[in-house]
Each structure stands twice: as structure tokens, then as C-alpha cells.
Amino acid sequence: MNLEVNNISVSFGDHAVLSDVTHTFKEGKITMIIGPNGCGKTTLIRTLVSMYAKDGDLSYIPQDIYGDTGLNVRDIVSLGRYDSSKFFQGESEEDKKYIDDALSLMELQDKKDQMFDTLSGGEKQRCMAARAVCQDASWFIMDEPASNLDPVHSKHILNTARELVRKEGKSFIIVMHDVNLAAAYGDEFVLMKQGRVMNTADELTSSLLSEVFDTSFECVRTPSGKNVFYSD
């Protein structure tokens, strides 16, 4: 199932955050949303979450993850296996396997008994990613998943997304600040500016980035064949 927004506009007071946004997010892909700060990226994905989360087949990982939960890491991850219909039924053997696999996938087995509130920002993001994987949803929406992570764990989360798409047909919508990570892992790119979708593409180019960010971008090709963008 694709996710669609049609002629969506959002304002906060007199300030228009989204203006007549229409786009179809295609299943089985990693779609990267790119644009300058304040262009409406987070508002767009929160709108998507509000529209589709009730179907129960979507998992959202926000950028800002706060503490003071009173739960340990395993407790947080296990919440991905619960909804209102089974909250008091306890964990099945299948649930336990999903939880253990998700902890292992995000390299959190050694921290499963640690209180969530004591984790670093990056560890909290990995924990929330594990909870999302544990939920086994078809769609994952992530807001700047690499913002608090070191390069190794940033690539680990994005490699995990790539494997979930390739092996299980999952779908991802990711707001990404790092254009080079976006270029390396994205299948489709939604470029936003001033609350509008300015362009969509299957591949990032210097001209697209220059148009959206109002500054000159250049591109060099590495020996491995990857494009690396930089701004003058």
C-alpha cells in the first residue's frame, strides 16, 4: 500500500508551514525527504503519521526522544509488540523472539536491563529503532535518525533499513539532514522548500540540491562509484 497526501496545507497561526503538498510515497522503497531547516519536513511526516497510524501498520521514530519513562531498554523495545487488545495478555514466545532479535539487531543486548532514561541520545534512538523493528510494521517513518549517532551507528541503522526493504519488502520515509547519507541509501527523493514539494527524483544531483538550498553544490565521484556532494 502506498501512502498519499493530497493538497495538504498546515498553518500555525498566520504562518503557513505546508502549502498544497501532494505526493505519493511508494511502498517497498526508502524515500528521503530533504530540504533546509524550517521547510516543513517534520510537519509533513507528522501529518502522515496522524493520517495512517490508526491503521496499526506504521511505526514512527521521532527526532526528539525524551527520558523519564521509568522503564528499562527491554521494556521500551517490548512496547512494539503490544496494542490495546493484548496489553494484559503477557508476552508470547513469538513476542520474545521479536524482542530479542530487535535488541540484537540494534546492538543493545548488553544494555537491555539499563534504564532508558540513562542512555545517551544515540542509544535512545537505537532503542526506539529496535522498538519500531519489533512492531513489525510495513511502514517506518523516521525523523533525522542519524542526528545523535556516530558514523558507524548511522550507517548501521540505514543498512538495517536497506535490508528490511530488500528482504521483507518494508517501506521507509526518512527525513535526512546529511545529503550524502541520503544519496547513498535513498531510492526516491522528495525535495522541499518553503512548505512545498519543489521536486522529486530517483537520484540526487548537484543542480537539485543547489535549487533547494539556494547555494552552489558540486559533486565528486569516489573510486567506489559513489557521488559525494559538497557546498561551496
Image (cartoon, helix red, strand yellow):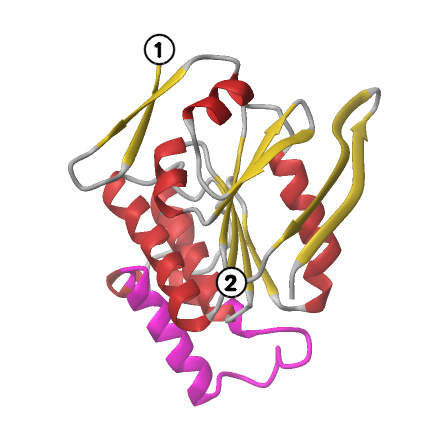
Left or right, residue 195 beside residue 131: right
Left or right, residue 20 beside residue 57: right
- SS at badge 1: loop
Left or right, residue 143 beside residue 110: right
**Can residue 22 be found in the magenta stretch?**
no
184 up-or-down from 156: above or below: above
User: What amino acid is at disc 1?
Assistant: Asp
Mark 2, residue position: 28
Question: Residue 181: image x %, image y %?
Answer: 35, 39
Give residue 85's quadrant in the image.
bottom right
Q: In which quarter of the image is the N terminus?
A: bottom right
Left or right, residue 118 beside residue 21: left
Which residues fall within the magenta stretch? Answer: 79-108
Question: Residue 49: image x %, image y %?
Answer: 67, 52
Give residue 206's quadrant in the image.
top left
- SS at badge 2: loop
220 up-or-down from 27: above or below: above
Mark 1, residue position: 232
What count of labels does the image hold?
A: 2
Callout 2: few (<14), some (14-19), or many (20+) C-alpha neighbours within 10 Å?
Answer: some
